[in-house]
Protein backbone atom coordinates (compact mmCIF):
# COMPACT_ATOMS: atom_id res chain seq x y z
CA UNK A 1 0.00 0.00 0.00
CA UNK A 2 1.43 3.36 -1.06
CA UNK A 3 1.25 6.44 1.08
CA UNK A 4 -0.48 9.43 -0.42
CA UNK A 5 1.72 12.51 -0.63
CA UNK A 6 0.84 15.33 1.75
CA UNK A 7 -0.11 18.46 -0.13
CA UNK A 8 0.19 21.92 1.34
CA UNK A 9 -2.88 24.13 1.65
CA UNK A 10 -6.58 23.45 1.59
CA UNK A 11 -8.31 21.10 -0.83
CA UNK A 12 -9.67 22.79 -3.93
CA UNK A 13 -12.96 24.53 -3.20
CA UNK A 14 -12.57 24.32 0.60
CA UNK A 15 -13.17 27.46 2.60
CA UNK A 16 -12.93 28.38 6.25
CA UNK A 17 -14.69 31.74 5.94
CA UNK A 18 -17.88 32.02 7.97
CA UNK A 19 -19.53 35.40 7.33
CA UNK A 20 -21.76 35.30 10.42
CA UNK A 21 -18.82 34.50 12.70
CA UNK A 22 -16.63 37.14 11.03
CA UNK A 23 -19.30 39.80 11.50
CA UNK A 24 -19.87 38.82 15.14
CA UNK A 25 -16.14 38.94 15.89
CA UNK A 26 -15.81 42.31 14.15
CA UNK A 27 -18.77 43.72 16.06
CA UNK A 28 -17.29 42.49 19.34
CA UNK A 29 -13.93 44.12 18.57
CA UNK A 30 -15.63 47.37 17.57
CA UNK A 31 -17.79 47.40 20.71
CA UNK A 32 -14.84 46.77 23.05
CA UNK A 33 -12.74 49.39 21.24
CA UNK A 34 -15.56 51.96 21.40
CA UNK A 35 -16.13 51.31 25.12
CA UNK A 36 -12.51 52.30 25.68
CA UNK A 37 -12.79 55.39 23.46
CA UNK A 38 -9.98 54.08 21.29
CA UNK A 39 -9.60 54.98 17.62
CA UNK A 40 -9.41 52.15 15.11
CA UNK A 41 -5.98 53.34 14.02
CA UNK A 42 -4.70 53.23 17.62
CA UNK A 43 -5.99 49.69 18.09
CA UNK A 44 -4.39 48.58 14.83
CA UNK A 45 -1.07 50.14 15.87
CA UNK A 46 -1.18 48.44 19.29
CA UNK A 47 -2.00 45.09 17.63
CA UNK A 48 0.80 45.54 15.09
CA UNK A 49 -1.35 45.51 11.94
CA UNK A 50 -2.43 48.00 9.29
CA UNK A 51 -5.48 50.16 9.98
CA UNK A 52 -7.11 48.95 6.76
CA UNK A 53 -6.76 45.34 7.94
CA UNK A 54 -8.36 46.24 11.26
CA UNK A 55 -11.20 47.88 9.34
CA UNK A 56 -11.77 44.67 7.37
CA UNK A 57 -11.83 42.68 10.61
CA UNK A 58 -14.34 45.06 12.22
CA UNK A 59 -16.57 44.99 9.12
CA UNK A 60 -16.52 41.19 9.09
CA UNK A 61 -14.68 40.97 5.79
CA UNK A 62 -11.75 39.04 7.28
CA UNK A 63 -11.38 36.42 9.98
CA UNK A 64 -8.08 36.89 11.83
CA UNK A 65 -5.71 34.05 12.65
CA UNK A 66 -5.40 32.77 16.20
CA UNK A 67 -2.16 34.68 16.87
CA UNK A 68 -3.81 37.88 15.64
CA UNK A 69 -6.82 37.29 17.90
CA UNK A 70 -4.43 37.20 20.86
CA UNK A 71 -2.71 40.40 19.66
CA UNK A 72 -6.06 42.18 19.29
CA UNK A 73 -7.12 41.03 22.76
CA UNK A 74 -3.84 42.29 24.24
CA UNK A 75 -4.25 45.61 22.42
CA UNK A 76 -7.74 45.89 23.92
CA UNK A 77 -6.23 45.03 27.32
CA UNK A 78 -8.54 42.06 27.76
CA UNK A 79 -8.11 38.33 27.57
CA UNK A 80 -8.79 36.29 24.45
CA UNK A 81 -11.54 34.57 26.45
CA UNK A 82 -13.22 37.95 27.04
CA UNK A 83 -13.02 38.69 23.33
CA UNK A 84 -14.50 35.29 22.47
CA UNK A 85 -17.28 35.76 25.07
CA UNK A 86 -18.13 39.10 23.45
CA UNK A 87 -18.17 37.38 20.06
CA UNK A 88 -20.53 34.69 21.39
CA UNK A 89 -22.78 37.41 22.79
CA UNK A 90 -22.85 39.05 19.35
CA UNK A 91 -23.73 35.70 17.76
CA UNK A 92 -26.53 35.27 20.28
CA UNK A 93 -27.93 38.72 19.55
CA UNK A 94 -27.94 38.12 15.78
CA UNK A 95 -29.68 34.75 16.21
CA UNK A 96 -32.55 36.26 18.23
Image (cartoon, rainbow, N blue to C red):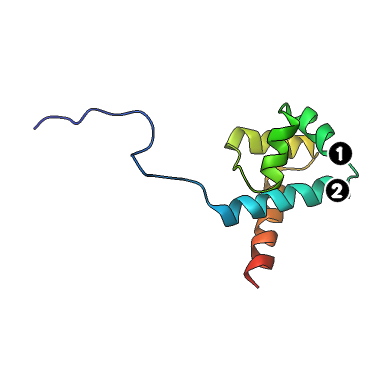
Q: Which residue is mark 2?
A: 34
Q: Which residue is mark 1?
A: 39
Nearest the eye: 48 or 12: 12
Mark found first going from the N terminus, 2 or 1: 2
Report helix, strand or loop for mark 1.
loop
Lateral position of residue 27 relative to residue 41, left or right: left
* Percent position of residue 1, x then y: 8, 32
Can you say whether 64 is above or below 28 in the image?
Answer: above
Residue farthest along the left direction in this orientation: 1
* Percent position of residue 87, x then y: 67, 54
Q: For the point 88% across and 40% down, which residue is it?
A: 38
Can you say whether 37 is above or below 96 in the image?
Answer: above
How far apart in space, not on screen, are marks 2 and 1 (Cα)? 8 Å
* Percent position of residue 59, x then y: 69, 48
Quadrant holding the C terminus: bottom right
Which quadrant of the structure image shows residue 95? bottom right
Classify mark 1: residues with Cα within 10 Å, few (<14), some (14-19) or many (20+). few
* Labelled disc at residue 28: none
Amino acid sequence: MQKRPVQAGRPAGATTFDAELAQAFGAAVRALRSEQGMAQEALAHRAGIERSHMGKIERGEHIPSLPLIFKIAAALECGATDLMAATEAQLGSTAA
